[in-house]
Amino acid sequence: MIMSLSVALIAVAFAVLVVYLIKTLLAAKSSLEKTTQTLQEVQQTIDELSYEIKQIVRHANDITADVEHKMKQIDPVMNSVKNLGEVLSELTLAAKQASTTLIHKFKQPKHQVESRPRHMLASASTPEERTIESYSAVYETGAKAKPAANVVKWIDTAATVWQRLRR
């Protein structure tokens, strides 16, 4: 009797153990199914995002190629602007020198102008001094300054009109 009771008790304990084991396995199965579903959703999201990222990268590459092409087209224009600036600088210097020479011709008597070499007409050594000297000669008052002032004023007016016409 004890033996059959012990066997019955062992059978009941084993049955209870099997029931709890089944519950635990079912809970683990449910967790694994939820994990599988979550991983599938993550994979789908990653696939969608990777397609969008590829489209963005392609668009960025197109924009970069377009910008590079336009930069190559603008390079000659920039070089031309640089060259134009240099030419205008040289032209301004030549105009200053011409106006200084012209002013000195009008200020000096005819025999002094012919006796001095051309490079010595401007007595100032720097361009700034020559400019100041030429403007002071133009805007001086007196009988000798009037013809030179009129000529320089006409030159200034002509230069202004020329600049406005070019725009």
Image: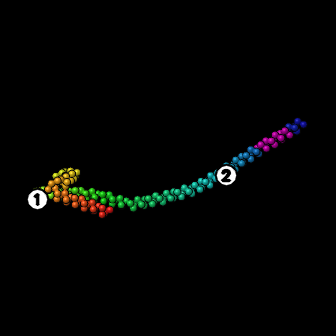
* Magenta segment includes 136: no
Q: Which residue is mark 2?
A: 37
In the image, 132: left or right of 63? left
Mark 1 vs mark 2, CA separation in Å: 107 Å
158 or 105: nearer the viewer: 158
Residue 54's disc number: none
Q: What's the residue type where badge 1 is placed? A: Lys
Magenta stretch secondary structure, dominant: helix
Q: Residue furthest front?
A: 142
Q: Position of residue 63 (x, y in %)?
A: 47, 59
Q: Quadrant of residue 54?
A: bottom right
In the rendered structure, which segment of residues is drawn in magenta?
Answer: 8-21
Q: Earlier in the sequence, mark 1 or mark 2?
A: 2
Q: Residue furthest left?
A: 111
Pointer 1 local density, CA inside 10 Å: few below 14, some 14–19, many at least 20: few
* Magenta segment includes 12: yes
In the image, 83: left or right of 67? left
Q: Disc 1 or disc 2, which is closer to the eye?
A: 1
11 or 48: nearer the viewer: 48
In the image, 13: left or right of 148? right
